[in-house]
Image (spheres, rainbow, N blue to C red):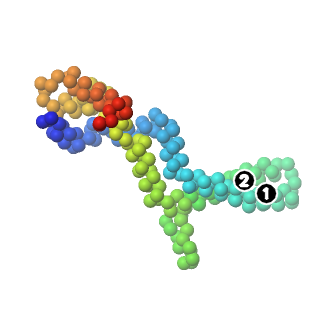
Amino acid sequence: PLLLPLVLGALQDEIDTVLDLDHVVLSAFVRDKEVLVDLFQKVGRVELEFLVNSGFGFGFVLGLGQMAAWAVKPLSWTLPVAGALVGYVTNWIAIKLLFEPAEPVNVADLFVVQGLFESRQIEVSDEFGDFMQKRVLNSSSLLKDLSEGEEQGELFHFLRRHLPFPIPAHILKAAVAAIAEVAAKPENYPEL
């Protein structure tokens, strides 16, 4: 109990040497692809809906041009070529409308135009932060990464540097293992 405040204070000061947050985030996305998919679907739901709906509208308008071209020149190659062109142009327009213009543009004092994703920047940031807090940077995943490596890990070396040397290595190893256990099965330790 006497050493805990000192160790926690030192851990706060040296957290960057003990815990690599870049590694925590990257490993969460690599380890669990579903996390990345969920992030994209949660944060980009409005934009994905726009892509689907705009594809219908733009495809219909461009398809009318395709129909006119077929009426003028009914050759067998015009339908697949025009179809590919319609698909490409439809996607290009939709993507442009999502991200451009990045800054709001006032059009003749009648209305403001801004890319859909850019116009939702504050909302997207809030959703992204909430997602990261709940799914990636939660206490369980932070403790898991903190306790990684047991005797070879940064936490063990940190504890060895900051606790009096008479404390045996097996006690430090047990402390790191206990943190790993809490991280692996947080439901077994509701008091923490």
Residue 180 image position (x, y, % from top left)? 32, 29
How crowded is the residue under tag 1: few (<14 C-alpha within 10 Å), some, or many (20+)? Answer: many
**Which residue lies at the image location 73% right of the left edge and 50% below the top edge?**
84
Decide: marks 1, 2 in contact (CB < 8 A)?
Answer: yes
Examine the rendered structure and indicate whether residue 74 appears above or below residue 145. below
User: For mark 1, what is the residue?
Assistant: 66
Q: Given the image, on which type of amino acid does mark 2 rest?
A: Leu
For the residue pair 156 and 187, the one nearer the viewer reads as: 187
For the residue pair 29 and 174, the one nearer the viewer reads as: 174
User: For mark 2, what is the residue?
Assistant: 85
Q: Residue furthest bottom?
A: 109
Q: Which quadrant would the C terminus be assigned to in this image?
A: top left
Q: How many marks?
A: 2
Give the spatial CA distance, label 1 vs label 2. Answer: 9 Å
Q: Given the image, on which type of amino acid does mark 1 rest?
A: Gln
Residue 39 image position (x, y, % from top left)? 49, 46
Residue 159: quadrant of the picture? top left
How crowded is the residue under tag 2: few (<14 C-alpha within 10 Å), some, or many (20+)? Answer: some
| Number of the label disc, if any, that sits on residue 7 | none
Examine the rendered structure and indicate whether residue 172 appears above or below residue 84. above
For the residue pair 45 and 102, the one nearer the viewer reads as: 45
Q: Residue furthest front?
A: 191
Residue 97: quadrant of the picture? bottom right
